[in-house]
Image (cartoon, rainbow, N blue to C red):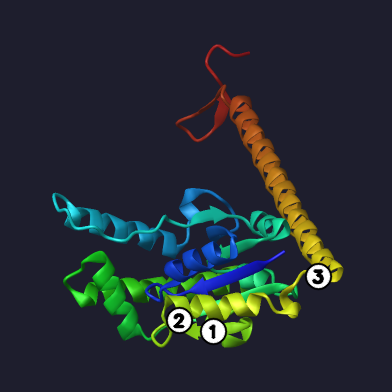
Amino acid sequence: MTVIAITHEMGSLGPEVCAALAGRLRLRHVRYTLSEHKEPDVASSQAMLHKILADHVRKRDAGSSVAVHRHDAPHPMTEVELIAYALEGDVLLEGVGAGIVLAPVAHVLRVRLCAPMTERVRRIAHRSQLLDARAAEAIAEAADAGLVRNGHRLFGAQVKNAYLYDLVLNTARLDVPACVMQVAVLAMAPCYQATIASTRILEDLHLEAQARVARFTDLETDCDEDLADAAASDDAAIETHAGDVVDPTGCQGPAPGGS
């Protein structure tokens, strides 16, 4: 039961490496953005930047026959869903968070792909047909800021910390086939094969994540009920005083026609 969690920076050949690796090892390839909720308004900065970049490319390619390599946007999902994919096994999880969430599970291989900013900018500009390298650099910097921000917000961790990963590859030095070979060989090592103990830990993580969601749901329900009760009390108070009028002299009395 192979489970590989790959994190990468924009412009570090992450989608290309992940797609090739999933094909070689016959793994299900899941691109995700991890958040507390699935609503679109909490989608990660990386997903939003992906859309901006794709829109820019489409505008530039309008009426042109030039083919540009694109990748589907990541799918927003919760921690429970992410762990469920790992439980199914034979999966490659591409995004930020799986390596941290699944850190207690010994058979999960955690990989980070990176490259110097200059190389990443060159790749982004080439892929998107951007004429201005400064625009490509701005996109890369914004993506990095989003990764760091989400890492702190969701996990309290620095996602660029090399100690969070089992393998860190510099794609400025290694091409896609070389990266695929390195990860594929390591994934076959005995220490990354699922055991009864490691699978039990994964199952426990899934139960704990489900329990957290249940507690959060109960808290939301209690808050909604409290708000509804408060609103009902306000309405009742308004109705109670609806018959009162304010006397110009400053004294309150019953409404005209009252007893």
Q: Secondary structure at mark 2?
A: strand
User: Residue 258: horizontal and vertical position, in percent?
Assistant: 59, 14
The residue beneath circle 2 is 114
Left or right placement of residue 139 versus residue 8 in this view: left
When the figure is inspected, residue 259 is found, relative to residue 97, above or below; the finding is above
Foreground: 196 or 241? 196
Q: Secondary structure at mark 1?
A: strand
- Dot 1 and dot 2 residues touching (CB under 8 Å): yes
Q: Residue furthest left?
A: 63
| Numbered tag placed on residue 81 in the rendering | none
Left or right placement of residue 188 versus residue 122 in this view: right
| Residue at the image position 77 percent from the left and 69 percent from the top | 194
- Dot 3 and dot 1 residues touching (CB under 8 Å): no
Amino acid on which the number 2 mark rests in the picture: Cys
- Crowding around mark 1 (Cα neighbors within 10 Å: few <14, some 14 to 19, many 20+) is some
Foreground: 216 or 223? 216
Label located before the other in sequence (1 or 2): 2
How far is the residue under mark 2 from the one under mark 3? 28 Å
| Residue at the image position 34 percent from the left and 59 percent from the top | 70
The N terminus sits in image quarter? bottom right
User: Residue 166: horizontal and vertical position, in percent?
Assistant: 63, 83
The residue beneath circle 3 is 198
The residue beneath circle 1 is 168
User: Residue 111: horizontal and vertical position, in percent?
Assistant: 57, 77
Q: Secondary structure at mark 3?
A: helix
The C terminus sits in image quarter? top right
How far is the residue under mark 1 from the one under mark 2? 7 Å
Amino acid on which the number 3 mark rests in the picture: Ser
Amino acid on which the number 1 mark rests in the picture: Val
